[in-house]
Image: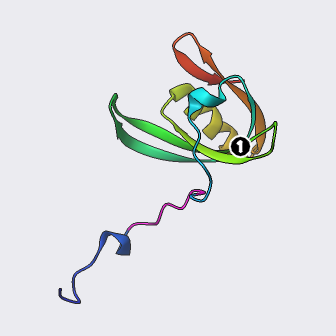
Amino acid sequence: MSKKNKRFSDFTPKLDFHNDLPRAVIGDILGQDIEVKDCYLIPNFKTDYGVHDCLLVHFADCGDGKEYTTITSGQVLIKKITSVKNDGNLPLIGRIILEKNYYDIV
């Protein structure tokens, strides 16, 4: 390999979003109080349901204080959580609920 060859890692930032924390599934935390600590928006993420934005969320369980991350493509969650972060209001306590056919945070 020539020294002139470059790698993607030479030009793209490393995504290091709390990789040491365990992952939680949204369905497992429905209806529980959580403290949302941080988030990271991933635009144009490809899933089985198409291409749309996704959000990595760092949160703590209000019951035991343990910290986790989760990922969601729920547009209501993305808009609400990123709005709160952009306004400088994280961390914030909320509860993810299933409202008709979509996830919400209250």
- Amino acid at dot 1: Asp
Q: Secondary structure at mark 1?
A: loop
Note whether 96 is above or below 51 in the view shown. above
What are the residue bounds of the magenta stretch? 12-18
| Residue at which label 1 appears | 87
The residue lying at 54 percent from left, 62 percent from top is 16
The majority secondary structure of the magenta stretch comes to: loop
Res 26 → quadrant = top right
Residue 25 in magenta stretch: no
Q: Is residue 9 left or right of residue 38?
A: left
The one of 27 and 79 positioned closer to us in this rendering: 27
Residue 90 position, x and y percent, is 74, 45
The residue lying at 65 percent from left, 46 percent from top is 68
Note whether 80 is above or below 44 in the view shown. above
Q: Residues within 10 Å of mark 1 (few under 14, many from 20)?
A: few
Residue furthest top as drawn? 100
Residue 25 position, x and y percent, is 56, 35
The one of 95 and 39 positioned closer to us in this rendering: 95
Res 62 → quadrant = top right
Q: Is residue 6 left or right of residue 14?
A: left
Note whether 5 is above or below 58 in the view shown. below
Res 44 → quadrant = top left
The residue lying at 60 percent from left, 49 percent from top is 22
Which image quadrant: the C terminus?
top right
Which image quadrant: the N terminus?
bottom left
